[in-house]
Amino acid sequence: MSLRKFLFSENYGRNIIWLMLSGFFTKVDAKENHLGEIIMPDDHYLFNLDNNNLDESYLNYNNLHFIILDGPVQHMNDQRLKKLRKKTQIYYVGKFDNYWQNIENASLLYPDNSSDHEEILLNIRKKFPIFFKKYLLKKFLTTFSGIKNIKLLSNHFQFKDKHVYYGYIKPTKQHLDNFRKKFYFEDKYIKNFFQDSHTSYDVKKKIKELCVLKE
């Protein structure tokens, strides 16, 4: 195990915090060991969030869990999904309901109800205290590693409003190429509203528009 995985309890991938905050680990009754590493229950297997290769050891388990953090693009392009030989539960983040309703064994990772999610957040902090202490260390180191960008650092401490959007505000060239091939749209039909945003109002407006488009 690398030093980073040990320090930040990233044995299932660098984005494990999003999985933790969703309540997934409490839902499957996972536990943490004395080092804050997540231990899945017996006969449960979680596919690593970072690996590109399929570890055949999953065949020894009956309860399989695959996390999709990058929406349909990841689902369509992750080669591991095409090689699976056992029934696997898929958990996804975000919109595109019309896409996911046609995918077998797919369900939302995060709850729809915000009050339910608040209760989940309280429970996971009690159940995984060591994990969150290590995550606090990660946040501290990440924040001060950006000290070379004085403006970004000062904004982080000075302004109260902070916005986290998990996804791409500006689509990558790979994303656009993939959707051109699958949906046969032309460049002239792509509305470019992904330019830089300078105010929180602009950010909120664009995220709302993007979420409507995803529906």
Image (cartoon, rainbow, N blue to C red):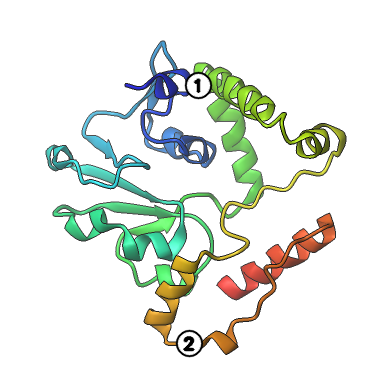
Residue named by callout 1: 131
| SS class, disc 1 | helix
Q: Residue 73 placed where, x, y %?
A: 41, 64
Reading the chain from its start, which is encountered first: label 2 or label 1?
A: 1
Residue at 81% over, 39% down: 151
The percent position of residue 141, horizontal first and vertical second, equals: 62, 23
Query: Which quadrant is home to the N terminus?
Result: top left
Quadrant of the image occupied by residue 45: top left
User: Mark number for residue 209?
Assistant: none
Residue placed most toward the observer, 84 or 64: 84
Query: Is disc 1 surrounded by few (<14), some (14 to 19) or many (20+) residues within 10 Å?
Result: many
Q: Is residue 48 left or right of residue 34?
A: left
The amino acid type found where label 1 is placed reads Phe
Q: In this rendering, does residue 24 appear at all? A: yes
Q: Nearer the viewer, mark 2 or mark 1?
A: 2
**What residue is pinned by disc 2?**
185
Point out residue 99 in the picture as x, y percentages from the top left corner: 42, 72
Q: Amino acid at mark 2?
A: Phe
At mark 2, the secondary structure is loop
Q: Quadrant of residue 123?
A: top right
Residue 215 appears in the figure: no
